Amino acid sequence: MHNVLGGIGNTPLVELKKVVPAGSARVAVKLEWANPTGSMKDRMAKVAIERAEADGRLAPNGTVVEYTAGTTGISLAFVCAAKGHPIELVFSDAFSDEKRRTMKAFGARVTDVPSEGRGINAALVKAMISTANEISKRPGHWYCDQLNNPDASDGYLSLGEEIWEQAAGHVDAFVHSVSTAHSIHGVTRALWRHNDRIRVVAVEPEESAVLSGRPSGSHKIEGIGIGFVPPLWNRELVNEIQTVSTEEAMAMARRLASEEGIFAGTSSGANVTAAIRVARQLGPSATVVAIIVDSGLRYLSTDVYKH
């Protein structure tokens, strides 16, 4: 019998039945809220911490340090609770209070960096990174540093393999939003091992489309669009980049809940919005896959479900 970490992965892949227009490709979504903390980041957190333990970067009972929009922080705190590591997380009021409470429930110590009008932008993210870097200099602390940690991408190889297996190899396109870029790259690497003709579409906020070469801005799609190009971003692992506005992402998140019974966050709404565009282009014989990143339970206090 496994401990709680054995519950990570093997999440359902389901077809959307109502929000996809007639004549479009089939759109299937991976329900990553079926992981123990309710998000795909459990995969990354487990791999990153176990590799750091294995090579000695993280000592027994050593403290983990990370900056986070909340989802990664929750997953790291969960893994740390299961393994007996203290954890220090740097967060902000730009993100939902549910995330802060959940991190603390798992035993995390949370340091807040204030935002300007709860907007998510490059200045805020860089301030959070700087704060985490200072905390990580304390004795016995290991800095996960997700943006610069190559182990994080490997944490999503399993996600790609599951998609391929559950779709019986019938995957024509994969559509996913970009934060650190680890999840889209990890899934792509796994899928392209099977079929390198699968079309990979990256998604970013319309208001801060830096991957598309446009100016950095402020948006409210939590967990993506950090306002600058992620250090480990690899354009060669993506065929196309699309933008989705905060308004479009929130509207689709609400539709997924009320029409499909899929309760998800705003980045999942962005994923499905772009996936439907691709599905229209590819036509009824194709299959497009997207990720439901996390549960809408994390966003009840935010604008997405205040309507």
Image (tube, rainbow, N blue to C red):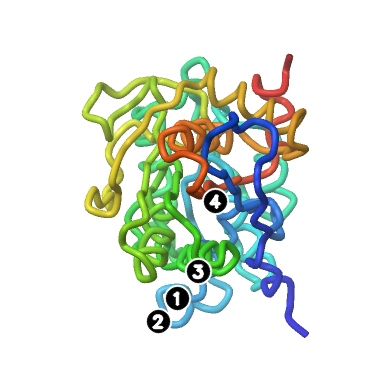
Which residue type does callout 3 highlight? Glu
- Give 262 or 233, whichever is nearer the viewer: 262
Q: Indicate which disc, 2 or 4, sits on the residue closer to the N terminus.
A: 2
* Residue closest to the eye, 167 or 70: 167
Question: Residue 55 has which mark?
Answer: 2
Q: Residue at x 64, y 45 (%)?
A: 294
User: Helix, strand, or loop for circle 1?
Assistant: helix
Query: Is 234 displayed left or right of 6 in the figure?
Result: left
Marks 4/1: CA–CA distance: 16 Å
Q: Are marks 1 and 3 in contact (CB under 8 Å)?
A: no
Relative to 29, residue 249 above or below: above
Residue wearing tag 3: 161
Q: Which mark sits nearer the N-terminus, 4 or 1?
A: 1
Q: CA distance from mark 3 to mark 4?
A: 21 Å
Q: CA distance from mark 2 to mark 1?
A: 6 Å
Depth check: 75 or 197 in front?
197
Task: Report if the CB atoms under discs 2 and 1 are less than 8 Å apart.
Answer: yes
- Indicate which label's residue lies in the foreground, 3 or 2: 3
Mark closest to the chain's N terminus, 1 or 3: 1
Task: Name the residue tied to disc 4.
Answer: 72
